[in-house]
Image (tube, helix red, strand yellow):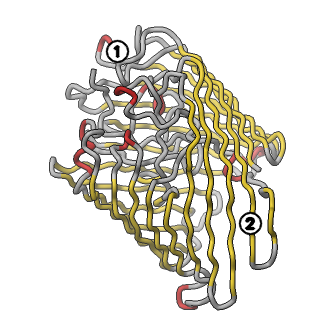
Amino acid sequence: MKPYLGTALGRSVCLLGGLWCCAVPAFELIDENDTKLSFDLEAVLGAFHSNKNYQVWGNREAGHSSWQEGYVKYGLSGSLARDGMGTVFGKAKRVASATWGDGDAGGFTNGSERTDKWEEAYAGWRSADLFPVLGKDGVEVSAGRQAVLLGDGFIVAGDGISAGRGLAGDAYNRGGGYYITPRRAFDQTLWIKLGGEQGLHGSLGWFKSDNPIQAKVEMAFSTLEYSGAAGTVGLTYLHGLGVDKKFAVDAQADRDGMDVYSIRATGNAGVEQLFLSSELGWQNTRRGNAQAGYVEAAWTFTSLPWQQTLGYRYTGYGAHWDSLLYGFTRGYGTWFQGEVAANYAGPFGANTSIHHVYWRAQPHENLALNVLAYDFRTHRPNGAPDTSGRELDLTLDWTVTPNVVVSPMLGLYDPKKDAAHGGLQVGDNDLNVYTALVISTHF
């Protein structure tokens, strides 16, 4: 059976909201003024249970799934600075990953995945003060195996789908760890950044994926941004240079020659408590055009305890939109909207509109609480599954120590239809209760 993936395989599911902002020093091997070398160690272990399964690949049956995922990322990072010559930097890291148990509820893994591979392996150079007109480190060039993030990841945020065995004759096996996303680096990249991070700045480059579930897509890109006190506005352009057609499903073949344009803005417009963000994107392919975009606003109540934030986002994905390589960037819900829907049940970033309301709070300096509600409306199914439904997620990030974050999660997902009536949930369209516990360490 050919799997339903729509035009959206851009999957690099979030690790943790809290983990990204609480990194601690690595094991310093050399720590001098101009020379740094460290051994970095990161480990994540997650346990998951879904009361329902989903027929994404045609390999799941009615019932529940319980599984575990884990990875260890280890290696070296460092830099060498010289007066008048800038700074050379680089990383060389491997990832050992595995999935146990039943495999995930969407059938991307079956629980037998085990692997240890190179992940990051790149080198680069920053200009320091060599080009004063461009600012501090106004030129940065890097190449090799690394993740590429454009904007806030609505279109490109690395190469993160980690499928496993049991689907497509094991052709897409990347070692498992589907939810915790142990791999984000593209196989080959060249990335040039100009102008630093403030004022007018931009980038251009190229990446090539070795991920078969992404059809080993190859693209060139460029960005132009202006950042000031009130926020950032930016433009992005990508051009598809090729895919491996033996792995391409559905519209992935259209990535060869695809043009992607987007305009985005984010910031507070000069109001401290306000957060605004939006991006509009257009794709041109041989088959036709597609559009997607979102608008988001949030308010932080500085006069209330717990640093409470209330926000709303509307996202619309066109019927033929290819979600490409979107991924987790600035918190739960970006850009995997719904712990169940985005990961297992669909929609996968295409042919849908999403209303999203969220409340975030910090009851204690070591606790971050998120309550996220979603309403999914499939546009015109046209033979594709109807993934309309609603979801309510509760997540907690507990920073036990500066090195350890514990994240329990609860998801309540209510689909409109089951697999027998045009949906993806197997057996019935009853409420699915999804639970997870993820423990993350970073040294």
> Alpha carbon of mark 2 to alpha carbon of mark 1: how far?
53 Å
The amino acid marked with disc number 2 is Leu
Residue at horizontal 56 percent and vertical 44 percent from the top:
117
User: For the residues carrying marks 2 and 1, which lies nearer the camera in this image?
Assistant: 2
Numbered badge on residue 419:
1
- For label 2, the SS is strand
Q: Position of residue 198 (x, y in %)?
A: 56, 76
Q: Nearer the viewer, residue 299 or 18?
A: 18
For residue 423, side relative to residue 362 (left or right): left
Amino acid at pointer 1: Ala
Q: Which mark is residue 37?
A: 2
Of mark 2 and mark 1, the one earlier in the sequence is: 2
Numbered disc 1: secondary structure: helix
- Please give the name of the residue rendered at 56% of the width and 36% of the height, measured from the top-left corner: 115
The N terminus appears in which quarter of the rendering?
Answer: top left
The image shows residue 382 at horizontal and vertical percentages of 20, 28
Q: Quadrant of residue 165?
A: top left
Q: Where is 189 relative to 308, above or below?
A: below
Residue 196 point in image, percent of width and height:
55, 77
Which of the 4 quarters of the picture holds residue 47?
top right
| Percent of width and height locating residue 216 | 35, 48
Q: Quadrant of residue 415?
A: top left
Asked if one can make out residue 433 in the rendered structure from this viewpoint, the answer is no
